[in-house]
C-alpha cells in the first residue's frame, strides 16, 4: 500500500516552538504533554502543508512566535505516493505565507495535489449546533481533499461576490456592472455545488461499505432560505432577479454560500444537532474516517490525519476502536493527549513524542 507521511518536520519561531526538529516514520504519531506545552502547534504546522489557513484558520502573523515576532518557517520532508517532496512555507513580518515545493516557488493551491490532510480539533465539537458557515467549511475541506481545484472555484466565487456586494452597498443600479460578476459567480457556484454533492456521495459510500464502531451519518446538502439550484444558468438568473432585494440588504442573499450540511445519526434517526455530546463527537470521527477511506480507495493512499485531543468524550473501548481503524487504514495520524496512557492501546504501532514547556519555549523529544 502507498503511504503519505511526513518524515521530517522542522519549525523555526512557529508559535511556542523557537526551534524544533522531529524525525518520524509512517506510523501514527502520539504526542503527549501538559496543556499549553505546544502539542497542538505541531499539528497546526502539519496542517499548513495543505492550502489555506490551517486547522486554526489563523493569519500568518498569528503563527509567529512572540515576543520576537521575527517571522516563522515550517519545513517538511514528505513521502507521497508519487515520490518524496520537500515543502517549505514561511512568513516574514506578518506578510502572507509563501510556499516552495522542491526548492521552487509554488502557489498554496499546489499543496492540495501533493498532501491531503484531514483534521479534527476540539473547536469542531460544536459543529452541529453552531452556524451553517462552519459546516460549509467542513464540507468544503472534504471536497478539497477529493478535488484540489475546488479551492479555485471557492476563491473565484468569493472574490466575485465581494465585488458584487460592493456594488450593492453603493446602490449601483446599472445592470451592465453586474453581468460579468454574476456570470463568474454562477459558473464557480455550479462547480462548488457539484463538488459538494460528489463529496457527499463519496462519504456516504465509504460509510456504507465499512464495518466500524462509529455511527453512520446520513448526509444531505440542505437548501436554506435564499439558496438556489446548482445549475449555472439557474444561478445566474437567480442573481439577476434578486438584485433589488440584495441591494436593500447590501449583500448577496442567494447562492451556494447559503446552503448547509445536514447530518442524521442514521441508527437512531436523530439529527446530529439533537444528539448527545459524545454522539456528536462520534459522528465527526465517523465522517473523518469515511473521508480517509474514500481517499484511500480513490488515490491508493490514505491522507494525513490530525486529531487534536481526540480522546475527549471517547471511552476506552471507542478510543481503542479508533486506533484500530487508523492502523488498518495505514494512515500517519498525528494525535495529541495529555498523557502517554491515552495511547496505550496503540502499543508499538505508534511512535511517541513528548512536548514540554521550558521557560516559555516548547521542547520536543521522542519518548519511545
Image (cartoon, helix red, strand yellow):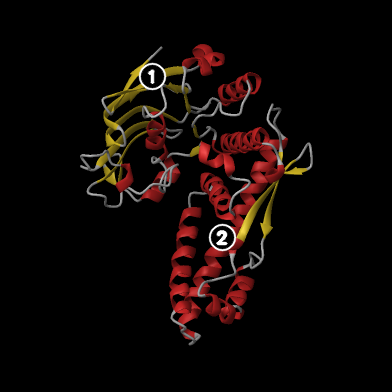
Choose between 87 and 368: the one closer to the eye.
Answer: 368
Element type at marker 2?
helix
- x, y percentage for residue 218? 72, 44
Residue 120 visible somewhere in the drawing = no
* Mark 2 lies on residue: 191
- x, y percentage for residue 71? 23, 43
Element type at marker 1?
strand
Left or right: residue 312 compared with residue 95: right
Picture layout, residue 21 above or below residue 178: above
Left or right: residue 59 compared with residue 141: left
Q: CA distance from mark 1 to mark 2?
A: 44 Å
Circle 2: is it few (<14), some (14-19), or many (20+) Cα within 10 Å?
many
Circle 1: is it few (<14), some (14-19), or many (20+) Cα within 10 Å?
many
State yes or no: discs 1 and 2 in contact (Cβ < 8 Å).
no
Frontmost of labels 1 and 2 is: 1
Picture layout, residue 194 above or below residue 121: below
**Residue 289's disc number:** none
- x, y percentage for residue 345? 57, 15
**Residue 354's disc number:** 1
Amino acid at each position: 500500500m502507498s503511504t503519505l507521511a511526513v518524515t521530517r518536520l522542522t519549525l523555526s519561531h512557529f508559535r511556542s516552538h523557537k526551534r524544533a526538529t522531529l524525525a518520524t516514520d509512517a506510523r501514527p504519531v502520539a504526542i503527549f504533554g501538559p496543556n499549553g506545552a505546544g502539542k497542538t502547534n505541531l499539528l497546526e504546522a502539519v496542517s499548513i502543508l495543505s492550502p489555506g489557513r490551517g486547522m486554526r484558520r489563523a493569519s500568518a502573523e498569528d503563527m509567529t512566535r512572540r515576543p520576537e515576532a521575527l517571522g516563522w518557517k515550517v519545513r517538511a520532508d514528505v513521502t507521497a505516493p508519487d515520490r518524496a517532496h520537500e515543502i517549505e512555507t514561511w512568513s516574514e513580518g506578518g506578510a502572507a505565507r509563501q510556499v516552495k515545493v522542491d526548492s521552487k516557488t509554488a502557489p498554496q493551491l499546489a499543496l492540495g495535489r501533493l498532501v491531503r490532510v484531514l483534521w479534527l480539533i476540539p473547536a469542531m465539537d460544536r459543529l452541529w449546533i453552531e452556524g451553517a458557515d462552519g459546516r460549509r467549511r467542513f464540507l468544503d475541506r472534504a471536497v478539497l481533499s477529493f478535488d484540489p481545484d475546488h479551492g479555485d472555484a471557492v476563491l473565484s466565487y468569493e472574490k466575485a461576490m465581494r465585488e458584487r456586494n460592493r456594488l450593492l452597498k453603493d446602490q449601483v443600479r446599472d445592470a451592465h456592472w453586474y453581468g460579468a460578476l454574476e456570470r463568474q459567480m454562477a459558473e464557480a457556484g455550479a462547480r462548488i455545488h457539484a463538488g459538494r454533492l460528489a463529496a457527499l456521495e463519496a462519504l456516504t459510500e465509504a460509510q456504507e461499505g465499512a464495518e466500524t464502531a462509529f455511527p453512520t451519518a446520513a448526509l444531505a446538502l440542505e437548501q436554506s432560505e435564499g439558496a438556489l439550484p446548482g445549475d449555472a444558468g439557474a444561478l445566474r438568473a437567480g442573481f439577476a432577479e434578486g438584485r433589488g432585494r440584495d441591494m436593500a440588504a447590501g449583500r448577496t442573499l442567494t447562492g451556494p454560500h447559503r446552503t448547509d450540511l445536514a447530518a442524521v445519526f442514521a441508527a437512531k434517526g436523530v439529527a446530529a444537532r439533537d444528539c448527545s455530546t459524545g454522539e456528536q463527537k462520534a459522528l465527526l470521527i465517523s465522517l473523518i474516517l469515511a473521508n480517509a477511506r474514500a481517499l484511500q480507495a480513490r488515490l491508493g493512499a490514505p491522507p494525513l490525519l490530525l486529531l487534536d485531543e481526540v480522546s475527549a468524550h471517547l471511552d476506552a473501548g471507542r478510543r481503542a476502536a479508533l486506533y484500530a481503524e487508523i492502523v488498518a487504514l495505514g494512515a500517519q495520524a498525528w494525535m495529541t493527549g495529555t498523557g502517554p496512557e491515552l495511547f496505550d492501546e496503540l502499543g508499538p504501532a505508534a511512535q511517541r513524542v513528548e512536548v514540554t514547556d521550558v521557560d516559555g519555549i516548547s521542547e520536543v523529544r521522542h519518548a519511545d
